[in-house]
Amino acid sequence: MADGKSLSLFKDKPIKVLLAKPGIDGHDRGMFVLAKAFRDAGMDVLYAGLLPTPEEVIDTAVNEDVDVIALSLLNGAHLTVFKKVSDLLKARKIDDIAVVGGGTIPDGDKIKLEKMGISGNYGPGTPLATIIAHVTQRAADARRKKLADR
C-alpha cells in the first residue's frame, strides 16, 4: 500500500482517475469492476466510454484534471494505442498525469509499455488491491510532479 507521505497528498482532494478503452474494444465489464473498486477506495472515477480516440482521452484527462489515466485493451492493439496516448501527452508537454495500463498484455509487451511510461499493465485476475495500490502510488507521483511544477 502507499506510504503515509503519499496518502497525505490526497487529504484535500481524492485521487481522480479516468478509465478509458481507446481503440476497437467493446469489452468493458472489467472497467466497471475497476470503477467500483476505485470508487470504494475513495477515488473520483470518470469513464471515457467505449471507443474514445487517444485524442479524446487526453482532452478529457486535461479538462477534468485527472491524476491518472487507466487504459485497458483486450484486443492486442495496446502497443499501438497506448503508445499513441503516451505520445500525445509528450507532444503536449504533459508530464503530471500518470498512465497505467491493463488488459491481455504479453509479458514482453509489458516491458515495452513500461519504457513508454505506462506502468502496471495488469491482466485479468490481478487482485484489485494490487491495482488500487499501484494507481495510488502513481497518483502520488503525479501530484508531486504538479506541486514541483508550480
Image (cartoon, grey):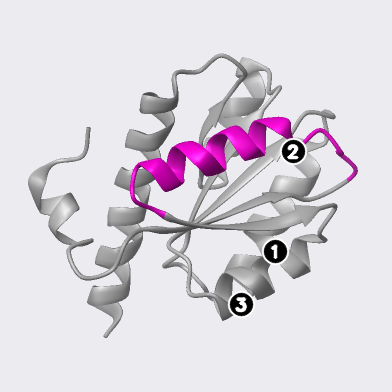
Q: CA distance from mark 2 to mark 1?
A: 16 Å
Q: Mark 2 belongs to which amino acid?
A: Leu
Q: Nearer the viewer, mark 3 or mark 1?
A: 1
* Residue in view at x 78 percent, y 47 percent: 81
Q: Earlier in the sequence, mark 2 or mark 3?
A: 2
Where residue 88 appears, x then y in whole percent? Answer: 68, 67
Q: Residue at x 59, y 27 (%)?
A: 110
Q: Residue furthest right?
A: 24
Amino acid type assigned to the residue bearing label 3 in the image: Arg
Q: CA distance from mark 3 to mark 1?
A: 13 Å
Labels in figure, total: 3
Q: Residues within 10 Å of mark 2 (few under 14, many from 20)?
A: some
**Front residue of this view, candidates 103 and 145:** 103
Q: Is residue 23 above or below residue 58?
A: above
Q: Which residues are magenta?
A: 24-43
The residue to which callout 1 is attached is: 57
**In the displayed structure image, the side of residue 38 where residue 35 appears, left or right:** right
Residue 113 lies left or right of residue 8; in this view the side is right
39 in magenta: yes
Earlier sequence position, callout 2 versus callout 1 = 1
Q: Identify the residue under disc 3.
A: 92
- Circle 1 packing at 10 Å, graded few (<14), some (14-19), many (20+), is many
Residue identified by numbered label 2: 79
